[in-house]
Image: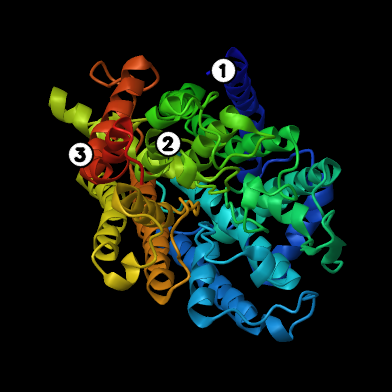
Amino acid sequence: MTMIGWIQIFLYCIIVVALVKPVGGYMTNVFNGQRTLLSPLLRPVEAAIYRIGGVDEKREQHWLTYTVSMLLLHVGGFLILYALLRLQAGLPFNPAGQSAVAEDLSFNTAISFITNTNWQNYGGESTMSYLSQMLGLTHQNFLSAATGIVLAVALIRGFARSSARTIGNFWVDITRCTLYVLLPVCVVYALFLVWQGIPQTLGAYVDATTLEGGKQTIALGPVASQVAIKMLGTNGGGFFNANAAHPFENPTALSNFVQMLSIFVLGAALTNVFGRMVGDERQGWAILAVMGVLFIAGVAVCYWAEANGTELMHALGVQGGNMEGKEVRFGIVASALFAVITTAASCGAVNAMHDSFTALGGMIPLINMQLGEIIVGGVGAGLYGMLLFVVLSIFVAGLMVGRTPEYVGKKIEAREVKMAMLAILVLPLMYLGWTAVAVVLPSAVASMANAGPHGFSEVLYAFTSATANNGSAFGGLTGNTLFYNLTLASAMFVGRFFMIVPAMALAGSLAEKKSIPPSAGTLPTTGGLFVGLVVGVILIVGGLTFFPALSLGPIVEQLASNANTMF
């Protein structure tokens, strides 16, 4: 580890925190229907969309209607994307002549992109046409990201409102999120990426002659526009198979730093939206502090592990840490930081191969996802996931003092705790259940490139990534098989929607409650004690749930590597 490395990490954190308040203020105005700088330009477009769609922007929805509207949007998105992939061979903007995508892979990919997971059992440049990348994948990147944000806002309204039966209008929220937040930023962002050297073209692939006289086909396409929303919307699906390690997706140190910032900016700012809407910005800062403690701890361990390398590397005289699987233009610190950021959020973009990390370095991204990706998390999804843990923590605190727990003026009772626990417990069922099946089924075991604990980690990482709607791959696992296409799709679907429905039921229940003023026995939820309580509950729940599985994978691999045994 170096001082320059820590300065990079410190600078990153400072910039993220500095962006929280201005971005949070802007987003609050957008979702409250207030005037913004872009209103003169975009308000006529917004009104036209409502007229065409038959939406009454002043009519709000009950939580159940809100949730059903969201599900209907995703059913339509799945059908359109599946059809597009199956028919792409006969559709335009296919200069490389890509054939139709197989049924099971189309199913997996369609589920992946509507759930904001972007798990890819394919190489983008060798499988997808330009039309599929633009109309199918990039389009869903916008809608799935917007969905996560508006669901978080709906849950915030549940905390903020009193004696209300509605939590907003889904169609209005998703229109405003896309039109005022995601699109304007992505237009500017894509232009920046083009300036950095990322292609944005509908031209055909280029044939080049190498210095050795060989022929090489260089894949191009409308890359910058997809990279912009994949990072800002924490989607992560790469235009190219190598994702953000590819020089056409992430060419410079500056593009790498800006991409890392864009992964966190909206998710972190939503904590400020929460504070503003409930009438106390300190509540938002307390939640961000919980996220920050967990994030810094993860970065420190991952950076230390990669900078230190392994005992075998030391014995062989390898200096400078573990550079295997990392881009020289990024180095160890930017690779380790990117890995923690992309798995703390539900982004899944990678600029280094996690399969080549040390055992402990690779364990941190795995833990980030297993905790439910609440450390900033996916846009929106991280906040509503964190608020579920807050509800659980408040309940635990209430048990300790023997009184009904309260949070931001709302009593937390049996219904709210049940909904929170249902949403939290559904995730390990998918992580661990499908992993148990895959490591005993011969056809699934055959997809593992490595034996022993490293091979186990490959499988555990895959189902964890899918269920957490992250989409990053540990590597070393052949996922494009019927078994993995179907099981990973089921994990992605359950991880997204079986968490959303209880969260929306919680929002509806809270909105109907009356707000009560704080009393002498109310637990302060803006200070260090509360932050420590929530961090402790998260780590205890995570440790009790996942320590046995981690012991079979990265922990035992680390112990073996200390004895110079590699897998």
Res 28 quadrant in image: top right
Q: Earlier in the sequence, mark 2 or mark 1?
A: 1
Please identify, in this view, whether the residue under mark 3 or under mark 2 is nearer the observer.
2
Q: Which residue is mark 3?
A: 544
> At 53% from the left edge and 24% from the top edge, which residue is drawn?
319
Disc ID at residue 358: 2
Q: Position of residue 166 (x, y in %)?
A: 45, 53
Circle nearer the viewer, 2 or 1: 2
Q: Is residue 235 above or below residue 288?
A: below
Is 401 left, or right, of 50 in this rendering? left
Q: Position of residue 406 (x, y in %)?
A: 28, 31
Q: Amino acid at mark 1?
A: Trp
Q: Tell me the distance, in whole angstroms, between the alpha carbons under discs 3 and 2.
A: 24 Å
Indicate the amino acid at tag 3: Leu
Tag 1 residue: 6
Residue 39 sits above or below residue 360 on the image: below
Say whether disc 1 or disc 3 marks the residue closer to the N-terminus.
1
